[in-house]
Image: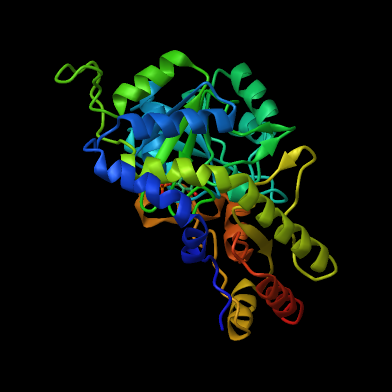
Amino acid sequence: MMVPFLDLKAAYDELAAQAEPAMLRALRSGWYILGPEVEGFEHAFAEFCGANHAIGVANGLDALRLSLMALEIGPGDEVLVPSNTYVATWLAVSQCGATPIPVEPDPATHNITAEGIRTAVTPNAKAVIPVHLYGQPVQIKQIVETSKELGLYVIEDAAQAHGARFEEEKIGGHGDLICWSFYPGKNLGALGDGGGITTNDAALAERIGMLRNYGSREKYKNDYAGLNSRLDPVQAAFLAEKLAFLNNWNARRKRIAEYYLESFQDLDITLPENLPGAESSWHLFVIRHKDRDGLSARLSEKGVQTLVHYPIPPHQQTAYAGLGIARDSLPIANQLASEVLSLPIGPHLQEDQVEKVIKAVQSSV
Ligand SMILES: *Cc1c(COP(=O)(O)O)cnc(C)c1O
């Protein structure tokens, strides 16, 4: 029996008894766009994040696009983004007509730093999008401070960081706008696409509430050229119930991560580094190894499924050939892409499966 990378069916089964009545209520309500289910989840999620406002949108990519639109970032503007992130962070910037400017990460944490932002900043830069990659929070307070000094807005890409904390504070209320994905595989995943934005800025919250809905507050009156990007009420009803499980499920991920860290400390692999004060949501457990593809193949033979997040950095994607960023100009992103390997870490990984992963890794490196 293969140890699966992530078992979404087991996750569903654990919360079905709570979630199904809520989804049925939404289905039978006769109200299928925005409305009370979406508002209920928005309030609960804002509170969970320690933010004043949450806005439900269609997906994580749109959360980023809507944030850039709300800050009026567009053609001629530049936005700093990690060189090693999932491509969506870059896509949001280019889809707004702005240009992504890569920032190389600290290879130990895989995350960008305040110093990295200072080094990469350009005269036309209007914002930075730090990504809490793999669920590991960036040093958000330093980054906000440096960005303010440089005149940059901070839009956090927290698509992998639901429930992560930095110095005891939940991620979700530090930057100007914080973007979330509820894609099924994320720590707070829906049963389809979903996304959200949290903020403490009431004016931005109001603008995004309109931008996601054709730029309109009152039907047939459009103040902005907005999108149709709304969180679905059935998904919102499901997410509101799932939110109650999140801390417990993140704690399970953390226990597995700690056991992996302890079991692998003497092996010839690079383990994920936890900064002091940073409490990861452990969306992914990412190790590094020189012979990544060989290790992945050996683990697969031993019944352990692994994935690579991500094999091709954005600047090397065909989609971004037009930016003219030289292949070798981002050596950290390139090296990470060739060495990273994600081990199974979901909240539904059973004890015997964790043991199997550990034995397989110990006998494969
Ligand atoms: C998943 C993800 C996104 C995009 O979210 P979708 O809901 O799939 O659009 C953006 N950034 C990062 C870092 C992600 O992991």
Which residue: 65% across, 74% down? 353
Of residue 204 and residue 139, the one placed in the foreground of this image is 204
Q: Nearer the viewer, residue 302 or 56?
A: 56
Q: Quadrant of the N terminus?
A: bottom right
Measuring from the top left, give residue 56's x and y in whole percent. Answer: 39, 34
Regarding residue 201, the answer to whether it shows in the image is yes
Question: In this picture, is 222 found above or below 244?
Answer: above
Q: Residue sitting at 70 percent across and 27 percent down?
A: 142
Residue at 46% x, 65% y is: 9
Which quadrant holds residue 230? top left
The answer to which quarter of the image holds residue 252 is: bottom right
Residue 163 or residue 82, whichever sits in front:
163
**Percent of width and height locating residue 24:** 32, 48
x and y, in percent, of residue 229 in the image:
29, 36
- Quarter of the image where one finds residue 141: top right
Q: Is residue 95 above or below residue 209?
A: below
Position of 113 compared to 128: left or right? Answer: right
State the count of labels: 0
Give how far across and how far down residue 58 sits, in percent.
34, 40
The answer to whether one can see residue 65 in this image is no
Query: In front here: 197 or 49?
Result: 49
Q: Quadrant of the C terminus?
A: bottom right
User: Left or right: where does residue 83 sit relative to residue 105?
Assistant: left
